[in-house]
Image (cartoon, rainbow, N blue to C red):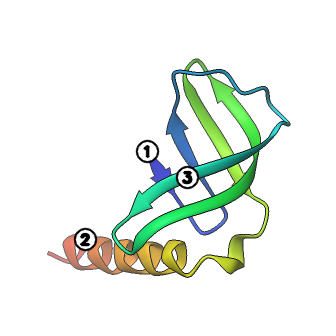
């Protein structure tokens, strides 16, 4: 749902307790990403995850950069 260099929000059909350490795997335009994260919040099926080592994933950084550029261009029209 939402992605930043420090974490993401996702809809899950399984339960993950707040505070639990999890391994996440997801696909970005730059390739598959596998990260460790902590469950920071939960509202129904929407979870917020904080990456444990946010600076170490080039694909996440590049995707966030590209999304920021695209948002900047669409916002200036």
Percent x, y for residue 17?
78, 26
Picture residue at 70% right of the left edge, 70% below the top: 54
Q: Residues within 10 Å of mark 1 (few under 14, many from 20)?
A: few
Q: Residues within 10 Å of mark 3 (few under 14, many from 20)?
A: few
* Tag 2 near tag 1, CB within 8 Å: no
Ranked by sequence position, the earlier of labels 2 and 3 is 3
Q: Relative to residue 35, is residue 74 depicted above or below?
A: below
Label 1: which residue?
1
Percent x, y for residue 44?
58, 17
- Give the quarter of the image for residue 29: bottom left
Marks 2 and 3 sit apart, C-alpha to C-alpha, by: 31 Å
Label 2: which residue?
75
| 9 relative position to 72: left or right | right
Marks 2 and 1 sit apart, C-alpha to C-alpha, by: 20 Å
Percent x, y for residue 39?
75, 40
Q: Relative to residue 14, is residue 3 depicted above or below?
A: below
Ranked by sequence position, the earlier of labels 3 and 1 is 1
Q: Quadrant of the N terminus?
A: top left
| 40 relative position to 76: left or right | right
Q: Secondary structure at mark 1?
A: loop
Picture residue at 55% right of the left edge, 82% below the top: 58
Mark identifier at residue 25: 3
Picture residue at 74% right of the left edge, 52% below the top: 37
């Amino acid at each position: 749902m939402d992605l930043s260099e420090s974490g993401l929000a996702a809809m899950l059909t399984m339960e993950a307790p707040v505070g639990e350490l999890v391994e996440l795997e997801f696909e970005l335009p730059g390739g598959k990403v596998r990260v460790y994260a902590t469950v920071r919040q939960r509202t129904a099926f929407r979870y917020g995850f904080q990456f444990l080592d946010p600076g170490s994933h080039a694909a996440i950084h590049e995707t966030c950069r590209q999304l920021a550029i695209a948002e900047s261009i669409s916002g200036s029209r």
